[in-house]
Image (cartoon, grey):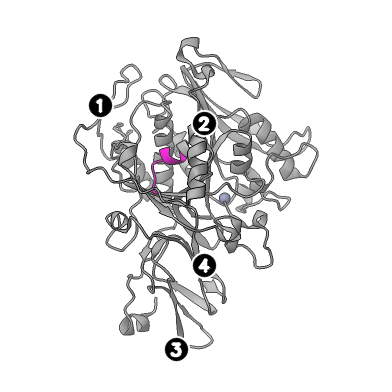
Amino acid sequence: MNLLNRLHTPPLHDYRKPSLKLNIPKIALRIVLIRQSLGLTVSEGDSAKVGPPISSNETKLPPRAKKRRFAPIMIANQIPMRRRKEIEKALEEVGGSPTKWSRNKGTKNHVFMRKRIKPGTIRHMEYELLDVEIGESWPVPISVIHGSRPGPVVTLLGAIHGDELVGPLALTYLCGPNFMGPEKVIDASVLAGTIRIVPIVNLPGYRRMIRDFPDGRDLNRCFPGKPDSNTTSRVAHKLWNNLISSSDYVVDLHSAAKGRTNIPQIRANLAHASSNRIARSFGIETILDSEGPRGSLRRVANQEGIASITYEGGGSDEADPESVQISMYGIINLLRSLRMLPGYPSKPRFRILASGSVWIRSDQGGLLDVLAPAGSFVEEGEIVATITDPELPGTQHDVISPIRGLLISSATHPFVNSGSPIGHLLPVKRGVSTLKKRLDDEGCLIISGSDGEPPWREDEEIEDIAVFGEWSGGSPDAEWGPASSTDEEEEEDN
Ligand SMILES: [Zn+2]
């Protein structure tokens, strides 16, 4: 922090250190909170036992609160007219549930990797990313939870980028004894449908603590892959055929690329009806309407008619506890919304549906002091960061927000050049008072699911705050990549 700046021109925000360090005790505490708010007992060793367990025999739900906690909020859907029509048309064309999910037909075995998984059971197994007879085949752990009732197949993926650890943590906790098993929130005997969980897809990258595969390629640009091409493309092809093509819904968990952090957010093509549905069902405020870069899992899955969304939270090489917690809540919300699990999903108080954003960039080089971290609601002209230069002591440059809006991403690496992105801002023109009601006393958005209070709300009561514009460079992250590249394939980080 810069004390001189404080004394002369007090910044609107206090200096806040982003809470992004690996903090396992904090995560453990949050798990207790999540379990309590889901009405589950806490296992031995946890601090307290709270709430009735969800029993496999007794799936009767508590009644919905009759009295609305909030006056209905007017829906202000202001996404640009042309895009709105595309989205509305896509939603109109949706039919009913496929007959294969019909409860009348009974449940069949789930066949995965030539193994038959009986209804109402959980199998933990290994899945080999490469077909080889000698050498490393990269076996990744996969858990298959096959419900006792028919329903959709949901595939949950973490660490397609090996250094993004929020996904692996969230999925590992969900597969653990606190959340999975008889009378837990994921109970195969009450589940309708099938959940397949792969906490670490890019195992070789994860072990090397790097984003890409060992051949230097980004798996999330290689879908649907080819069987006779490069290593990463072969992995993509095998995953596509064995895991993705047989899924009805795919949730892909990511974090920001090195040097920055994202607030928890969903990215989805809102004109893809079933993806739109699960994007909203995740229960968080920020949804970016974006189809994803070429070769990304989300884009290719949508092209093949499979619902797919990307969750982004925190940064790479770190385990932001809030992002872990929110993604766990989101997955449970999604499964409840699809009627695969008993219980009511929680909903946010409003949603920001964004079709465009603005980048805040530095005009000077030096070392950065971030005053408004990701999640801050900033005003036009507000100082969001200061830059000092160790080679020119006493000099300082302020980075100003060009407009009012919500910072959904900010730099975490202090070194900047002129032109370096400092923050990624969603301009907010309407719904400002709604949004401001959900700011903490430091001016940061309190994201639904982060405060351990799942409110049961009807979808119609949520105000949509639309953000106008276009993704510069064609996608939400196009401008953060290397300066030499202008190809969005190289740049979007998700
Ligand atoms: Zn990623």
**Mark 3 residue crowding within 10 angstroms, few (<14) / some (14–19) / many (20+):** few
Q: Which residue is mark 1?
A: 62
146 vs 60, left or right, is right
Q: Amino acid at mark 2?
A: Glu
Whole-percent x, y for residue 349 in the image:
31, 46
Q: Amino acid at mark 4?
A: His
Give the vertical position of 348 relative to 419 (above or below).
above
> Is disc 1 placed on a helix, strand or loop?
loop
Query: Which corner quadrant holds the N terminus?
Result: bottom left
Badge 1 vs badge 4, beta-carbon distance below 8 Å: no
Between disc 4 and disc 3, whose residue precedes? 3
Question: Splitting the image into 4 quarters, where does residue 75 fall?
Answer: top left
Q: Which residues are magenta?
A: 278-285
210 vs 106, left or right, is right
The residue drawn where x is 46% and y is 17% is 149
Q: CA distance from mark 1 to mark 2?
A: 34 Å
Q: Is residue 275 visible?
A: no
**Between tags 3 and 1, which lies in front?**
1
Q: Which residue is mark 2?
A: 93
**Between tags 2 and 3, which lies in front?**
2
Q: In the rendering, which numbered label is found on residue 394? A: 3
The residue drawn where x is 44% and y is 37% is 331
> Is disc 4 placed on a helix, strand or loop?
loop
Q: In the rendering, which numbered label is found on residue 413? A: 4
